[in-house]
Image: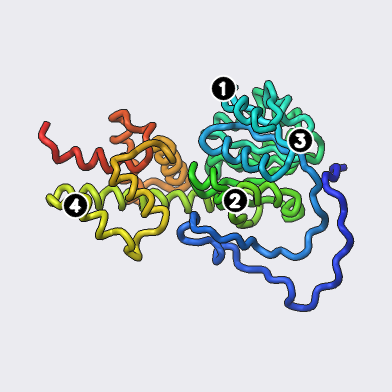
Amino acid sequence: MHRRWWHAAPAPAPASAGSVRRRSVLATLPLDPWVRDSEHEDLGEPEGRMTQARVAVLGLGGMGAPMAANILRAGLPTVVWNRSPEAARRLGDQGAEVAGSPADAVRRADLVITMVTDADAVRSIATDQGMLAAMAEGAVWAQMSTIGVTETERLARLVAGERPDVVLVDAPVAGSRGPAEQGRLVVLASGPEQVRDRVAPVFDAVGQRTVWVGPAGAGSRLKLVNNLLLAFVAEGLAAAVAYGDALGLDRAAVLGALHGSPLVSPWAAEKLERIGRDDYTTQYSLALALKDVNLALREVEAGRFPAAEGLAAEWQWVVDQGLGVQDLTVVTRALSRLGEPA
């Protein structure tokens, strides 16, 4: 039997017909998911209210660390683990409990979050390092790393076969380091409907909106859609600015003309401002962005989306120049240098 980690609330009064709104989740997802919209889906009255759920966050990189900090700020008891301990110690100074291993981190956790680089890291934590075996009966595993559809389905089979008493929620996020620090991510969640109220306080702590899109795996599918759009927007910015350079235009004039354009979202405007300063410090590294584009392409037959394949090839060329650790907007620099004398 699953243990309850919330106290039951009094039963609500019967709702009148039409009083509970159920909006199309895709209709509520903004084209630019970094625009603040604090309204969450209204899914009706919750079954119960969560009381001081204990949260374990595994993976404290550019995304995991600010997410854990926001969970702490929300007042939820939080235990953290990271492969390199310095990031965990910093959160320990903010009030988090620091665990020595993934297994130790999750033993008493009601909700476990994994936020790491790729599927290999997720599998290593879950199996080789004992996370899944150590999780409490009835606990929820919110897998928030971007690992693609195939790997998410593989994890779902793993949980069903080895820990059917654990609930898997597939919940990657839209947003990069800045939105993560500000608690403005969009959580693209999928999984059993009955756990939505249980995870809501944690998802609310890390994001401005949670979009539920069906059974586990649907969230990862939507994340690939989001990432493909993001890739084309970033490539468009880089190519447009570099093309202006190739035409001999003053870059400041080009950026000034694009400023305020209806084609430029707030996210794109911030990227253009950084390009104008020749600032490519990492928010979302080119290497990770390329990994995510390749994940999207892996789910469809070769040749189906030739523009995306061309983008991936170009980005691989930039990564091969040693620029993969910088922000994905560093493609601008690589394209602009093509016209420089050897």
Question: What is the CA distance from the residue labelled 1 to the residue labelled 2?
Answer: 25 Å
What is the three-letter code of the residue carrying label 1?
A: Ser
Q: Which image quadrant is residue 42 in?
A: bottom right
Circle 4 is placed at which residue position?
A: 244
Q: Quadrant of residue 109?
A: top right
Looking at the image, the residue that sits furthest to the left is 341
Residue 181 in sight from this viewpoint = yes
Can residue 164 be seen in the rendering of this structure?
no
How far apart are the two marked residues, 4 and 2, measured between alpha carbons? 36 Å
In the rendered view, does 164 fall on the left or right side of 263?
Answer: right
In space, the residues marked 1 and 3 are separated at their CA atoms by: 21 Å
Residue 95: which quarter of the image?
top right
Please give the residue where the numbered disc 3 appears in the rendered image.
109
Residue 207 is tagged as: 2
Contact (Cβ within 8 Å) of mark 1 with mark 2:
no
Q: Amino acid at mark 4?
A: Gly
Q: Which residue carries the number 1 mark?
A: 84
Tag 3: residue type? Answer: Ala
The quarter of the rendered structure image containing the C terminus is top left
- Please give left or right for residue 187 compared with residue 232 in the image: right
Alpha-carbon span between mark 1 and mark 4? 43 Å
Sequence-first disc among 4 and 2: 2
User: In the rendered image of this protein, does residue 16 appear above or below residue 176?
Assistant: below
